[in-house]
Image (cartoon, helix red, strand yellow):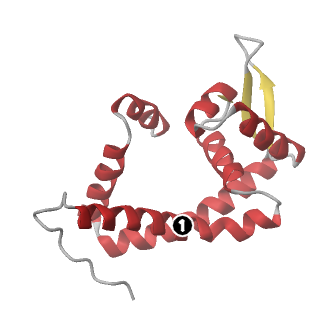
Amino acid sequence: MAVPPSSASPLFLREAEIRRGVELLYFGYNHMTRAIDERLATEGLGRAHHRALYFVARQPDLTVSTLLSLLAITKQSLGRVLGDLTARELIEARVGRDDRRQRLLRLTASGITLETELFEALRARVSAAYVEAGPNAVVGFWQVLEGLIPAPERQRIARLRGG
């Protein structure tokens, strides 16, 4: 049974309230991702691999440079992640249609299967939390998370939703 949420203090910008929010973000994310860690480990993969699979699933034919920007990791780290995913035949890279220097990323059938399985585990966790919190809290949660993202980057996230 979840601890009932207390209402936010009218002094919600005090250190105690900010620390509570930071802690809840940390522990919430940690528990959400634990739902998939074991499955990733059976494939010899980690969370960086999952993030790459997730974003390529959201935008088939995503360019390597766009994925690099979304993940905010080094080229070397992304190269290792993509190398692992390609070697396991979970992702494939094609030459760009307009620019032959581009590499367009797409999940293979096996990649789609794995990403779907991982997403379903995450969806179960997030859905349960959404139900418990209620629709107004969900919208407020989205607003807070969006507020953590610098304004110029919000457009990129909106494009993932087709907005």
Where the C terminus falls, by quadrant?
top left
Residue drawn at (67%, 34%) of the image: 74
Residue type at numbered disc 1:
Asn
Lateral position of residue 141 relative to residue 8, left or right: right
Location of residue 70 by image quarter: top right
Q: Nearer the viewer, residue 159 or 18?
A: 18
Locate residue 71, reporting x and y percent: 59, 39
Farthest residue to the bottom: give it: 1
Locate residue 114, reporting x and y percent: 74, 57
Farthest residue to the left: give it: 10
Locate residue 29, reporting x and y percent: 50, 63
Location of residue 101 by image quarter: top right
Location of residue 115 by image quarter: bottom right
Answer above or below: position of 150 versus 129.
above
Locate residue 11, reporting x and y percent: 12, 62
Element marked by disc 1 = helix
